[in-house]
Amino acid sequence: MDAFMKQSEYLRYDATALADLIRRGEVSSREVCEAAVERASSVNASLNAICLPRFSEALAQEFPEQGTFAGVPLLLKDLAQEQAGQPCTYGSHGFQNNIAPRDSEFVHRAREGGLVFLGRTATPEFGLKAITESELWGPTLNPWDTSLTPGGSSGGSGAATAAGIVPMAGANDGGGSIRIPAAYNGLFGLKPSRGRISSGPLMGENWTGASSDHVVTRTVRDSAAMLDVLSGPAPGDPFVIPAPAEPYANLMQKAPGRLKIGMFTASPYDTDVAPECVAGVEETARILESLGHTVEYARPEFDGMAMARCYLGLYFGEVSAMIAKARKEQGASDRDFELDTRLLGMLGETLPLSDYVLLRQQWNEFARALGAFFTDYDLYLSPTTGQMPARIGELETPAHLKIAAKIMLALKAGKTVHRSGQADQMALESLARTPFTQLANLTGTPAMSVPVHWTTEGLPVGVQFGAAHGGEGVLLQLAAQLEAASPWQGHYQRLDAAFPGQGL
């Protein structure tokens, strides 16, 4: 093997740099992919990040040489991001035999961009949790500390990228699933605006518009260039949003100007926020002020508990629909779904349709509140997560609650749960660790997690910025500014050297 392709050399380059080396003929795509496979072979056994490896197919894949990332390896998330002729399991036994009939728009555009598909990354069942621990694939571990979760639902992609298997990996975000793994794995993660990246052709809008596809990356420029590859409408999309004035890869290199940023650290749901997460925001605020920006305490005014109810209502509806789809198309039965998933599905089936529609209509209230906030501020700054990563297995449903869930399912007690108000408690329990990310999903606005802060123990802590709809450009500009002012790439060198092994 060429000396360049030693793991230590492969790990030095982001996707943009690898593509440039391939384009200039200094290394071949096959050599780069072989290095990625070698890295995967040395670290994936410790992490369980890749659930469906396709290494031999990747080494044989043809790609357009004019693509932005021609010859660079990419991992796809095993949730949507369908690849024709390949499995897409959604992390569920109910879809373990599901073969995609055609490429999703994400995969189609990534293919046109020259990317080579190395396989698929693990996700919790249906992407429902902020941890990546499914019964189908088992738990995925955090490379910074393998006793901890890498977050979810793009936890496999986050762990694989942080560990250097690939410089970036496919992800999607319906409630924080790009930003949470980015925060827990020390990566950059941008959730685009609703409609920026097409959900087609199998969907018009994923999660009725709450979810967006993109990637998690080690560098801001990779995310910007990938947004150029992926963005833009496809035939049949429900709407088109304005394109940027110039490519994001160019736009991010320009200074954002002096920004006025509203900062808050209190949970919208009045749940506890870890001191490390607060410290990350405060440190970032100091850096922002040193860069000439104005930062002051301010937050959008909306009913947090109402947002939690709306978000859980979305869960109920989507899960019941996914279960019904698996039964119809895959012949799935109850035993093919995890207990928590079955309970959510029952609550979806018993939620009155009028209540579901009213909850969906209420998203408008949060969009208007955020719109009012952006008349005074350019961006908001908050923690990405409310808590540091949970330990593997820590969030497993306790035995007594499993018994209660089984009884509720046996009695078909969904209507009783809705009437009793227990759903409110479920909303708080499910969102307490990650209370800051759902606002961007329900409003369709862009938001990003930036790895500015690190604990004394060496764990990454993400901070979140949000912008008005269509504001990806200013987010990328600010992220590039922070990346230059407080570089995080040096942390990866410690992590790169930790494998094979059990993290730091």
Image (spheres, rainbow, N blue to C red):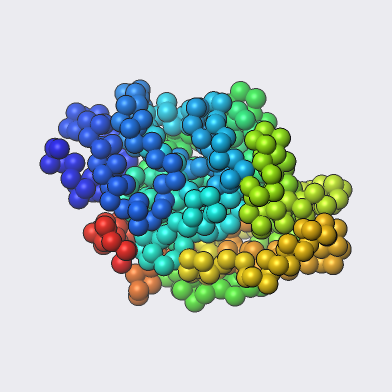
Percent across and percent down for residue 52 are 44, 41
Image coordinates of residue 309 in percent, x first then y, are: 74, 60
Residue at the location (31% across, 39% down)? 16
* Residue 113, picture quadrant: top left
Residue displayed at 61% across by 23% down: 235
Q: Position of residue 453 (x, y in %)?
A: 40, 66
Q: Look at the picture and state if 454 lies above or below 369.
A: below
Question: Which one is in front, 242 or 346?
Answer: 346
Q: Is residue 127 left or right of residue 333?
A: left
Is residue 297 among the parts visible in the rendering?
no
Q: Is residue 40 visible?
A: yes
Q: Between residue 334 and residue 471, name the one nearer to us.
A: 334
- Quarter the N terminus occupies: top left
Residue at the (49%, 77%) spot, across then down: 275
Q: Is residue 111 left or right of residue 201?
A: left
Residue found at the far left of this picture: 3
